[in-house]
Image: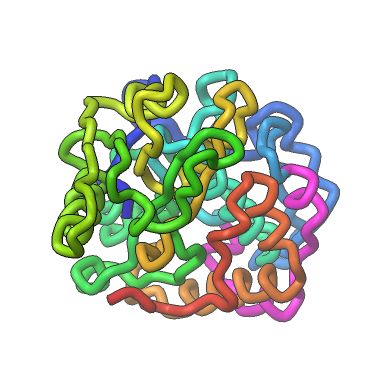
Amino acid sequence: MRRTNSIRISTLVTAGTLVLATSACGGQGLGDTSGTSSSGGTVVLDKAPAEDKAAAVINAINPDEALTAKVPPQIKTKGLKMTTSPGYPPMELFASDGKTLIGLDPSLGRAIARKLGVKISIANEDFNAQIPGIVTGRYDILMSSMTDNAGRQAKVSFVDYVQAGAGFIVKKGNPNSTKSPTDLCGKTVSVVDNGSSLDLAKTYNADCTKGGKPAVNILKYSGDQDALLQVKSGRAQVNITDYVVASYKASDSKNDVEAIAIKGTESPWGIAMNPNNKDLISSVQGALDALIKSGEYQKVLDAWNLGRLTVPSAVVNGGK
């Protein structure tokens, strides 16, 4: 995952923990789809906020009656309590009001909730406090670009929802024809210092020199914006970063760059849950599979320009 020895985009994060019921965000309270609570009453489902790029897709999702019938009673009554950590666009970020949480993770959380026919609240929590929050029951699900790996599986169970890795940022049109790590030999590369991108750059440099090719000239910077600037200015031909970051930067036409995924660097990111909540794990897995099969999952990812991250099915604890 990007927060274990990886790149982090700096954003202004509101101090303290901010719990956002999506029905409280502008225009979200008037749902056009209904679910059923454990008492048999009708639940008006939350609408996605206007700044959610996948809002149109999410708001058109209808509950799956078979899945809704199997949702744990406490979730039907109280809704899903989700936690995430903003500051990593386009996966998690604040909308322009500085309060509403948007990004791919909140989008998919809302989509899953609507497929299950339940409401959802989304909490801004410090990343390191999220797994303890799942273990203690403070939250039901955790979606925060978290890598599913064996170490974390000792504490939580995952339903894997995307496959993400590293990427190159190059000038629009890729004038230096950078397509794979072997194309970096003899080129100048910018990275964020002390992150996973630096580790990759060092590995690629070693491969070049071992093969008798020119070394990679590595420029190190304290932040991703400075590293990106080197490509825009022409000082570096390539910036190595997380693919989701590369894709987000490339989606802004003012940057005049494009993103290239680095094959072989991918790993699964998962929705974390308490391993004892087997019914909830099954419900979330079923909802994600239903979204994948319906094509709604692909549309949500495409809305955030992250269509390359798709998985073919919802796998439990697929990380190594």
Q: Is residue 69 left or right of residue 74?
A: right
Q: Nearer the viewer, residue 152 or 170?
A: 170
Q: Where does residue 96 sit, x and y in percent of width and height?
A: 59, 20
Q: Name the residue: 82% across, 54% down.
A: 60
Q: Residue at x 39, y 20 (%)?
A: 12
Q: Report the quarter where the C terminus lies.
A: bottom left
For residue 210, above or below residue 199: below
Give the image location of residue 47, x and y in percent: 73, 43
Q: Does residue 230 show up?
A: yes
Quarter the N terminus occupies: bottom left
Instruction: Please determine whether, in this image, residue 292 is positioned above or below residue 101.
Output: below
Q: Residue furthest right?
A: 32
Q: Position of residue 236 (x, y in %)?
A: 35, 30
The foreground one among 320 and 37 is 320
Q: Is residue 63 magenta?
A: yes
Residue positioned 76% across, 71% down in the render? 294
Is residue 4 something one can see in this rendering?
no
* Magenta stretch bounds: 55-77
Q: Is-magenta flag for residue 170?
A: no
Q: Is residue 190 above or below residue 45?
A: above
